[in-house]
Image (cartoon, rainbow, N blue to C red):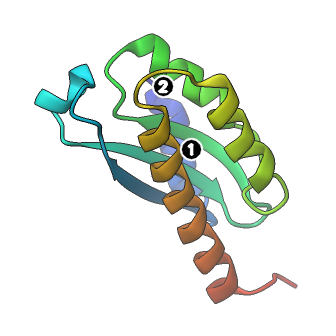
Amino acid sequence: MHGHDQIRHLFTNPDVVLVSGYARLPDTVAGHSQYERLGVVLAVDLSDGRIVAADTTLLTDLAKEFFRALVEGLSVTEDIAEIVHRVQTRYAGQSGAALATALRRCLETCYQLRDSHGPKE
């Protein structure tokens, strides 16, 4: 979990937005009985597209931390292919397809937000 001070700092930056994406979990996944959907949440700095924080509803802390390590610091404007590639090739859990789908939905939202905000001068 991210520290309280780090989250507070994100609130003070008006360029940071929170986006989320969800995907249906396979019936065979342990978390399916608790959650039917897997969620991905990204805090993105729209000024440079950088993912400043990430979280997911994966069940174990290790899986959540691994996901964070894969995506945080990358840019949703310059590193889209790398972000998706990392998750698809490095996360081999049974929830992998749902994780990739939820992530893609976040990235689509970021793309739409970037287009609606336009370039900064």
Q: Position of residue 3 (x, y in %)?
A: 48, 25
Q: Secondary structure at mark 1?
A: helix
Q: Quadrant of the C terminus?
A: bottom right
From this viewpoint, is residue 14 visible? Answer: no
- Around disc 2, counting alpha carbons within 10 Å, would you say few (fewer than 14), some (14 to 19), or many (20 or more)? few
Q: Secondary structure at mark 2?
A: loop
Query: What's the residue type where badge 2 is placed?
Result: Gly
Q: CA distance from mark 2 to mark 1?
A: 10 Å
Q: Is residue 78 above or below residue 99?
A: below
User: Which labelled disc corresponds to residue 3?
Assistant: 2
Say which residue appears at 58% left-offset and 68% top-offset: 108
- Around disc 1, counting alpha carbons within 10 Å, would you say few (fewer than 14), some (14 to 19), or many (20 or more)? few
In the image, is 39 to the left or to the right of 119? left
User: Which labelled disc corresponds to residue 9?
Assistant: 1
In the image, is 89 to the left or to the right of 29? right
Q: Is residue 81 above or below residue 91?
A: below
